[in-house]
Image (cartoon, grey):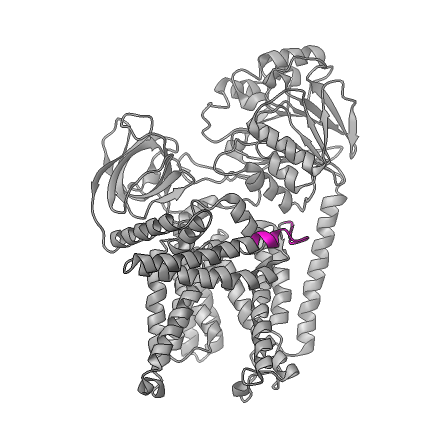
Amino acid sequence: MAGDGLGNFGLYLPLAGAIAAALAATALFLARRPALGIAIALAGIAAASTIPVHELLAPAPDGVNIRRFADGARVTIEGALVREAEPYHGRTHLFVGVERAGETGAAMQPASGTLRVTVLYPAGFKIGERVRVTSSIRFPRNYGNPGEFDYEAFQARAGVAATMVVAAARAGAESSIASIGYDRRFPASAIEEIRARIGAFIDANLGHPEREEMRALIIGDQSAIAEDLRDDFALTGMAHLLVISGLHLSFVAAAAFAAARLLLALFPVLMIRGYANKLAAIVAALAVSAYASIAGHHISTARALVMILAYLFAVMIDRAREVTASLALAALVICLAIPGSTADLGFQLSFASVIAIVLGMRGFAARWGRSRGLSVSGSIGGRAATIALGYCAVSFWAMLGTAPLTAYQFNQFAIVGVVANAVVVPVMGFAGVILGLAAAVMSFVSAPVARVVLLLAGRFLAAGTWLARWFVAWPFAWTRTFTPTLPELVIAYGFLALWLCRPLSKDDRAPDQRSRPPLPVPSAPLWRLAIAGLLAAALAFDAAWWIRDRYFNSDLRITFLSVGQGDCAVVRFPGSRVMLIDGGGELGEFDPGERIVAPYLWARKIMRVDYLALSHPELDHFGGFTFIARNFHPGEFWTIAAPSSDVSYLELLGALAQAGARVRLVDSSFAPATIGGVTLRCLNPQPAEVATRNDSSMVLKMVFGATSLLFTGDLEAKGERSLIAEAPDLRSTILKAPHHGSASSSTEAFVATVHPAIAIVSDGYHNRFGFPAQEVEDRYRRIGAELFRTDQDGAIEIGASRTQMHLRKCARARTSSG
């Protein structure tokens, strides 16, 4: 796991190092130095474990792989579907094992790799179906913002080498897909047919939203679950209930084990000889494997299956108490089978929760039993109290073990999660899933009986949904959090480990373990105090650093975020106030405010934005503002007097009203403002000017010491001429190039008048408009300006004191093939 983690951080050790470590360890064993030999052997294993991750995330050039094509090239590909098609909000994701490929007009050549094809309409393709796809090929690519989700690595771990989008079914269209054959595959095709039949049975007998929930929990189809329902479960810490997770597989395994154990009780000879548990574990393994097969190919399901099977294997070999060893075995198998797994959030959450439960319940069971004198063999009231409190304790430890990770990934903490999980998990996770699976099995035998069972399961799902919506409405049910850094995660888990691994006294240990030696953990109080002191000192230093950075930094800091085809600049004034100039990005498969802008702010410990400034009401400039308005409590919203009937804009205005933000219409008559020592002036539009969207864009100029910045929105040639005539001084150190560098903007006169040292173009990678125009790039370079593009350079970070300035681009160098 250490080597897998190092590989995910980009640290790759050569194979020669692993071989050298192996030889050195062998020599030390022969020299009777086993302790040092083990240490070096483990280091060698870690070194060797970085190699498969390296090969996954940075594959060597291959003349056959589809990565050989240029990013954006128009390519025709032939291959067969290797995984079941995934419906996704009216579109379909296909996974094609490539066999042949060639650029348009060129001969088809043998090729390899897995291609994900997004078909922009519902499409009925099956596993084994051979298809021909023609479209522009794209390679998974990050935006290049600090601390962003690593989409490239995520797709690499999923085995996806490239992507395509298909908009039409007809041949000869700009992009198309056609079936050219079918080869039935065993057992995948049979499983696909079973899934389809179960899905049709669910659709015919349940209504919304129970139908979508049941499909998600039984056959792993989450495509039709509404976003508001996902949000309600996520905000109460119960998002895992809407996906097939280790929890559901555990319920299935437990139910199968209990049923088999009950039947085997009819055969006393098996009980006496100790075979009952082993046979029940085999039955549970078969049942949970069948469920995982029907549930689909998702990595999270496969990972959970490995964890369950590892524990059932421990039961079969009479090692049921060795839970941590079972976890270690599961982690080993997962990392070997799926390199890079340690970077997967599902892997982290699964193991963090289970380890926290195991260690937490170890101390809870001992201390509760000793202090209360209660056990499963005591009075009925005592047993009931022990079971109820233990059940709540499991929920508490799971939440505590995963809290730092959920804060890191989702920036929220479900305060109500302990209670909500304790109440809703048995309703949906146990009753709903077990009854739903029973109904699915029965549907192949007796449809009327299966329908009755399914309707009962649907009632449990409806109850769970109602409870989730009830819990989310509680006051302080959940709260937003900033993104912890990796050192902060280490500190948090360090404190948690000190608590969970505290040594038990002999009296605290279970009766059958009191004769055993204590666990090999540091037991001396001074040891634990020293570690706690170091963690506390690190936490104090970290808090002081961030308080200074957030509230007492004397520099002006601007970050031009890479938001695709759109604009967004985060301005952090000296002191603590923050302004967003545009909230960019056209709304596509995700909200740029939620997925790009907000994560950047949370990573900088920014929980409030004081000013939102919208250059003009076009979607690629305000696309992310609605989420920001709902989650960052903006004080003021600056915009121009340009009308817009866009539904998204009306939604934004509603969110701003709900947040209590003051709306200000800004033009050149707006009085200059001073924020944190930075002078801010609006140069455009002119008062009473007829709004023309682009040429009426709000133009802001900031001056701080020797550094000046000009933000120009989507100003075009006409607006530039007007600005030159009306504005007194346009010369600026840094220019946000007008209209994403279009040919209709950045005229010779305007570029010469502003004469920036640095010009920044905010644009989308391979955008359909061809921005920026080559002549515009040449124009800036001729005056000696450095030109930066967010599509190539990622986010551009600028820091300025009163006397000097520095700039940093965040994206690594990229090649044409991604």
Q: Is residue 38 magenta?
A: no
Q: Vertically, is 715 above or below 793?
A: above
193 displayed left or right of 236: left
- The residue closer to the viewer here, 245 or 147, is 245
Q: Quadrant of the C terminus?
A: top left
Q: Position of residue 149 (x, y in %)?
A: 52, 46
| Residue 11 visible in image | no
- The residue closer to the viewer here, 577 or 19, is 577
| Residue 631 visible in image | yes
737 displayed left or right of 209: right
- The residue closer to the viewer here, 640 or 646, is 646
The number of callouts visible is: 0
Q: Residue at x 65, y 37 (%)?
A: 629
495 displayed left or right of 55: right
Q: Which residues are magenta?
A: 468-482
Q: Position of residue 472 (x, y in %)?
A: 61, 52
Q: Vertically, is 94 above or below 751?
A: below
Q: Position of residue 383 (x, y in %)?
A: 57, 80
Q: Residue at x 78, y 35 (%)?
A: 676
Q: Position of residue 625 (x, y in %)?
A: 61, 34
Q: Quadrant of residue 553?
A: top right
534 displayed left or right of 314: right
Q: Quadrant of residue 290?
A: bottom left
- The residue closer to the viewer here, 477 or 76, is 477
Q: Is residue 476 magenta?
A: yes
Q: Vertically, is 668 above or below 534?
A: above
Q: Vertically, is 158 above or below 785?
A: below
